[in-house]
Image (tube, coloured by chain):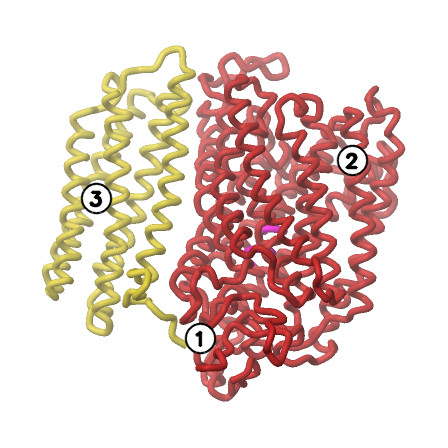
Chain colours: A yellow, B red
């Protein structure tokens, strides 16, 4: 038994299965983060006082982190493009850099978290800190999830690349779509929490 | 070429040889096995959720009296001397709702029927992502076990209602935390399932099977999947926030200045209990349509098949279902008219609520009109399907006064509400699900279920359902609150309608007795049922083209579709049904 359209596109929809699947998954992710962003709005509208993000949070570190994530999105595209050009070695390089940038992001994030805890700023202190930790924490989990997928592709990729290059390229594309989404969420999070 | 194109079994036997028992029946990736797993598990949960209610009905009918035998079994913590403590009553209420909705009806209608029949009806070899499908079932299973386990943690299971409203749920016993973990598993399961369904329907339709040739059941599952996909994540977010409130001490849902038992609560405050209600009902209202749409799909299939004529207004039904799905995201706050969110918002939501009743009425009217002039076969599945129509009608019409803010003030939180939504999901959806089981059992096993037992099951269930739920309208209109542990014994408004409690409780227990023939019939017919050919009902849709039971991979050569789903009694045809895969005469 063979399930159709696992690696080639269905002519009338123009999509292979996993690509449609990941777009649907991202739609549900939009709703997930959308609910949390709405929570932010509702809490802030209902609050008597709301701190200015920059007074509590570390804007320079977060700016660096923004650059890192955007950079990792670029390398992610490059790794997929390398496969499209048939260069598996280049894919390994760019995907490796993507994973490293992910680690850097998480490292800086943990420094930020650590500094908060040192100053006894916990989620329970105020609704601002609560939504800050909820949003960035959930985003962090998404980064970790993406890195696990990327690492899996990086480590085990060569076998599938030899047996079914088209399907492997698709997998990288799908992982890339997810990675860009995680990046995009941060691009909304950063101004909302740190700057507004 | 006829519908009886035999698919040789030998071709497929190679697939089975090296597959171990575990891979074949337990960790199977075959949509049919997963469908059966979903079906059996959810039937067990339905029975369990019903049992919880039968216990509650004892307390409601005979408040404070000792329950013989079973009371002793449940033990001293929950029922000392056989008398139910209020805390246990609350657990039963919360878990009855949770189990029936999230572990019973949805997994049966989507997980079981959807999994088994969507790929067959669209002529696909399997679901698009078999591994995800398996993961979806096991996430559901873990979620279910977590929910059951919550009865054994200190303080028992969740006891803040199935809606888990804070601040109550934020400060409730440990069971609430377990409930939230269970919900996260269930949400994950339905997320994986819904992605899989949509991709399968979009990508794996057989050649010639355009969207407007899809059986309505597939359309219903399609819309349902979108609802699950987009409505559940906000509840997941809300669940995470409530977990944080309970575990890390945040105040998302805790307002400032909360005092509990005379003690100010040591939290930062500043949160909003209403926020939870918005997030919760943003899921839970589309969830209502998740509960009803697959049922409508099943009923549509059975009605077309047993009236031997095309479904009346197929296109209107399909467009209505799509519009219903779309609108269901815009009505959630009609559950919250009494929260003081303001008249402007109430007006908006009561308007959208009136609008959403239109497509439901179109669907149900089309199904009723479909009966007109048909030569109706009163088979067991058809009896259940026919009963669905008035039951859903009662459920829907009694919803209108709840959707209008003015009349809702009187009816809110009374037994009227309970009667209303149970008419939709219990005599409505559950009767339709039974119809589906009787209708498709021959496809799953190659044998028919016993008709006499089926009829006993039908009439018993149908009558009892009404005995249970009709008096709720009477009590509710009298103003009896739904939250009373003693069934209203100490409640002034309830004195005139108190006698109905015993009637409803006896109805519930008698209904249990009428489920026994079904359970017996279900298991007996697997081995002993009357053997039937692959298309015993003379049906047109693709699942009846596969052998019964369908082998791994469903079809040897994937079928090609030449016509719409309900070509019954076409003039000039030799038979009164023309299967979708039958080639046109000139071809």
Question: On the image, numbered disc 2 is attached to which residue?
Answer: B472
Question: On the image, numbered disc 3 is attached to which residue?
Answer: A103
Q: Position of residue B290 (x, y in %)?
A: 55, 47
* Circle 3 Cα neighbour tier, 10 Å, few/some/many (<14 / 14–19 / ≥20): some
Q: Nearer the viewer, mark 2 or mark 3?
A: 2
Q: Nearer the viewer, mark 1 or mark 2?
A: 1
Is residue B149 visible in this depiction of the protein?
A: no
Q: Nearer the viewer, mark 1 or mark 3?
A: 1
Cα gap from disc 1 to disc 2, whole angstroms: 50 Å
Is B106 within the magenta?
A: yes
Q: Are marks 2 and 3 on the same chain?
A: no
Task: Give the residue drawn at x 55%, y 40%.
Answer: B178
Extreme-front residue of the structure = B572
Would you place residue B31 above or below residue A173 in this image? below
Where are the magenta residues, as a range? B105-111
Residue closest to the eye, A16 or A188: A16
Q: Is residue A79 left or right of residue B417?
A: left
- Chain bearing tag 2 is B
Cα gap from disc 2 to disc 3, whole angstroms: 59 Å
Residue B412 figure quarter: top right
Cβ–Cβ under 8 Å for marks 1 and 3: no
Would you place residue B263 above or below residue B319 in this image? above
Q: Position of residue B288 (x, y in %)?
A: 58, 42
Say what secondary structure mark 2 lies in. Answer: helix
Cα gap from disc 1 to disc 3, whole angstroms: 51 Å
Is B24 within the magenta?
A: no
**The disc label shown at residue B560, or none:** 1
Q: Is residue B343 left or right of residue B486?
A: left
* Circle 1 Cα neighbour tier, 10 Å, few/some/many (<14 / 14–19 / ≥20): some
Task: Give the residue drawn at x 55%, y 26%.
Answer: B166
- Chain bearing tag 3 is A
Task: Give the residue drawn at x 66%, y 76%.
Answer: B536
């Amino acid at each position: 038994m063979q399930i159709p359209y696992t690696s080639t596109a269905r002519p009338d929809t123009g999509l292979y299965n996993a690509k449609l699947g990941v777009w649907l998954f991202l739609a549900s992710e939009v709703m997930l983060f959308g609910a949390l962003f709405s929570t932010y709005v509702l809490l802030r509208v209902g609050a008597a006082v709301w701190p200015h993000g920059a007074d509590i949070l570390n804007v320079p570190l977060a700016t660096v982190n923004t650059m890192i994530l955007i950079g990792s999105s670029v390398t992610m595209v490059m790794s997929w493009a390398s496969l499209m050009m048939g260069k598996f070695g280049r894919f390994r390089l760019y995907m490796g850099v993507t994973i490293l940038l992910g680690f850097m992001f998480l490292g800086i994030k943990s420094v930020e978290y650590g500094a908060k805890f040192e100053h006894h700023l916990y989620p329970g202190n105020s609704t601002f800190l609560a939504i800050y930790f909820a949003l960035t924490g959930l985003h962090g989990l998404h980064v970790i999830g993406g890195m696990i997928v990327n690492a899996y592709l990086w480590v085990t990729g060569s076998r599938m690349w030899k047996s079914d290059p088209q399907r492997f390229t698709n997998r990288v594309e799908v992982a890339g779509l997810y990675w860009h989404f995680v990046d995009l969420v941060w691009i909304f999070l950063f101004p909302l929490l740190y700057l507004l | 070429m006829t519908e009886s194109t035999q698919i040789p079994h030998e071709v497929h036997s190679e697939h089975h040889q090296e597959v171990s028992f575990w891979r074949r029946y337990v960790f199977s990736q075959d949509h049919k096995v997963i469908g059966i797993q979903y079906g059996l598990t959810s039937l067990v949960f339905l029975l369990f959720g019903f049992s919880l209610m039968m216990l509650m009905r004892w307390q409601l009918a005979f408040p404070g009296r000792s329950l013989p035998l079973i009371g002793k079994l449940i033990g001293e913590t929950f029922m000392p001397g056989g008398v139910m403590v209020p805390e246990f009553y609350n657990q039963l209420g919360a878990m009855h709702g949770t189990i029936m909705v999230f572990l019973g009806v949805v997994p049966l209608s989507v997980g079981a029927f959807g999994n088994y029949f969507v790929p067959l009806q669209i002529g696909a070899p399997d679901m698009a992502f078999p591994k995800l499908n398996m993961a979806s079932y096991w996430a559901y299973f873990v979620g279910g076990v977590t929910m059951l386990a919550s009865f054994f943690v200190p303080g028992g299971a969740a006891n803040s209602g199935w809606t888990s409203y804070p601040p109550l749920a934020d400060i409730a016993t440990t069971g609430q935390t377990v409930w939230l973990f269970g919900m996260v598993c269930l949400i994950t399961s339905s997320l994986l399932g819904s992605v899989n369904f949509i991709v399968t329907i979009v990508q794996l339709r057989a050649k010639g099977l355009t969207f407007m040739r899809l059986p309505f059941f597939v359309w219903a599952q399609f819309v349902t999947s979108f609802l699950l996909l987009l409505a559940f994540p906000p509840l997941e977010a809300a669940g995470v926030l409530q977990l944080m409130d309970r575990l890390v001490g945040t105040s998302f849902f805790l307002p400032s200045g909360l005092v509990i038992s005379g003690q100010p609560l040591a939290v930062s405050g500043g949160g909003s209990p209403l926020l939870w209600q918005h997030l919760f009902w943003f899921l839970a209202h589309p969830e209502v349509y998740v509960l009803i749409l697959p049922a409508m799909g099943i009923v549509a299939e059975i009605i077309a098949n047993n009236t031997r004529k095309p479904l009346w207004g197929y296109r209107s039904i399909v467009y209505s279902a799509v519009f219903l799905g779309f609108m269901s995201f815009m009505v959630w706050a009609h559950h919250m008219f009494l929260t003081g969110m303001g008249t402007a918002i109430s007006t908006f939501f009561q308007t959208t609520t009136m609008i959403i009743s239109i497509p439901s009425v179109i669907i149900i009217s089309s199904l009723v009109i479909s009966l007109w002039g048909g030569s109706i076969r009163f088979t067991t599945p058809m009896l259940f399907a026919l009963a669905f129509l008035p039951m859903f009608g009662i459920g829907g019409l009694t919803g209108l006064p709840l959707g209008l803010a003015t009349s809702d003030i009187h009816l809110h939180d009374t037994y009227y509400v309970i009667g209303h939504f149970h008419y939709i999901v219990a005599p409505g959806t559950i009767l339709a699900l039974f119809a589906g089981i009787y209708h498709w059992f021959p496809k799953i096993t190659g044998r028919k279920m016993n008709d006499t037992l089926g009829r006993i099951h039908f009439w018993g269930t149908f009558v009892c359902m009404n005995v249970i739920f009709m008096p709720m309208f009477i009590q509710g209109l009298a103003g009896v609150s739904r939250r009373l542990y003693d069934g209203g014994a100490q409640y002034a408004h309830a004195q005139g309608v108190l006698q109905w409690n015993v009637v409803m409780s006896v109805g519930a227990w008698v209904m249990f007795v009428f489920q026994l023939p079904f359970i017996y019939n279900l298991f007996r017919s697997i081995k002993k049922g009357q053997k039937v050919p692959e298309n015993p009902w003379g049906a047109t849709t693709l699942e009846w083209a596969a052998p019964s039971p369908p082998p791994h991979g469903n079809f040897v050569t994937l079928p090609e579709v030449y016509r719409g789903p309900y070509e019954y009694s076409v003039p000039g045809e030799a038979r009164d049904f023309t299967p979708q895969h039958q080639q046109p005469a000139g071809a």
